[in-house]
Image (spheres, helix red, strand yellow):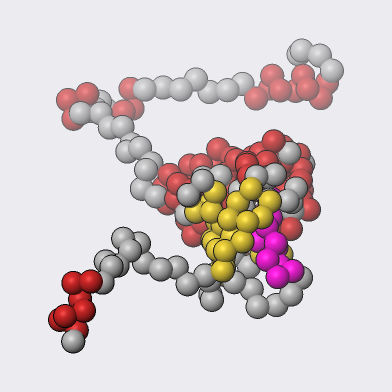
Amino acid sequence: MWEKERPTLHPLPPQPFEACRLRAVTVSKMSTVVFETNQYSVPCAYVGHKVWVKVFVDKVSIVAQNEVIATHLRCDERDQMILELDHYLDILLRKPRAIRDARAMNSPNVPEVVRSYHREMRRRHGADGDRAFVRFLLLHREVGMEAIASVLNTASSVAIYHLEGLHELLLRETGQAPAMATLPPSQIPVDLSQYRVQKADATRYNALTSGGVQ
């Protein structure tokens, strides 16, 4: 009977069936979409846009123009905010002070070292520290949050709290640091003792305490 019926059956669809609930929603000013009282974040560029929310048994995917722009684990609780820090970094780059109170910084997927390092960088450099820190966090899109956290741990241990130092550590962490330039053997001096550095005259600095040049 199966062999007789098979020629009359329609072919399977080219895409597998998605066992999900589909909702059309508008992204809020908080850059979130709401499903069953819970808010899920999307990239801030989509604020005010119409998007589709696909709710699976274990995850929530947000789709805009046939592209998945965010995916979160589905929350079974109520009135929760499930936020991804990366979704807010572009706007925080324009308003870096806002990172001080950003709820996304307390997201479970943000390592604790990120928060503690930012507090210290802000204490040392104020608004400039906020701005530099956000710029550094943006690099996680290239190297991943695990590498960022590793660099921040290293920087904390050696008290490096500036963007240039963080960038240098990241290059070393990812194996991108340039190799040290070396002279060919034919150009290396045989006797380095021929090189002399003029000794500084420390007495000239007495002018700083005496009020005039001696």
Query: In the image, is residue 97 part of the stretch drawn in magenta?
Result: no
Residue at image coords 70%, 62%:
34
Residue at image coords 56%, 69%:
21
Q: Residue furthest right?
A: 211
Is the residue 91 above or below the residue 67 in the image? above
Most foreground residue, 116 or 99: 99
On the image, the x and y values in percent for residue 145 come to 51, 56
Is the residue 156 above or below the residue 213 in the image? below
Most foreground residue, 103 or 55: 55
Q: In which image quadrant can residue 18 be found?
A: bottom left
Whether residue 144 sits left or right of residue 97 in the image: it is left
On the image, the x and y values in percent for residue 195 come to 36, 22
Most foreground residue, 123 or 10: 10
On the image, the x and y values in percent for residue 51 come to 60, 51
On the image, the x and y values in percent for residue 155 come to 56, 52
Residue at image coords 61%, 21%:
201
Q: Main secondary structure of the magenta part?
A: strand
Q: In which image quadrant can residue 162 be found?
A: top right
For the question of whether residue 97 can be seen, the reply is yes
Most foreground residue, 116 or 214: 116
Residue at image coords 47%, 72%:
19
The magenta segment is: 31-41
For the question of whether residue 149 can be seen, the reply is no
Whether residue 182 sits left or right of residue 106 in the image: it is left
Identify the image quadrant of the N terminus: bottom left
Q: In which image quadrant can residue 52 be found?
A: bottom right
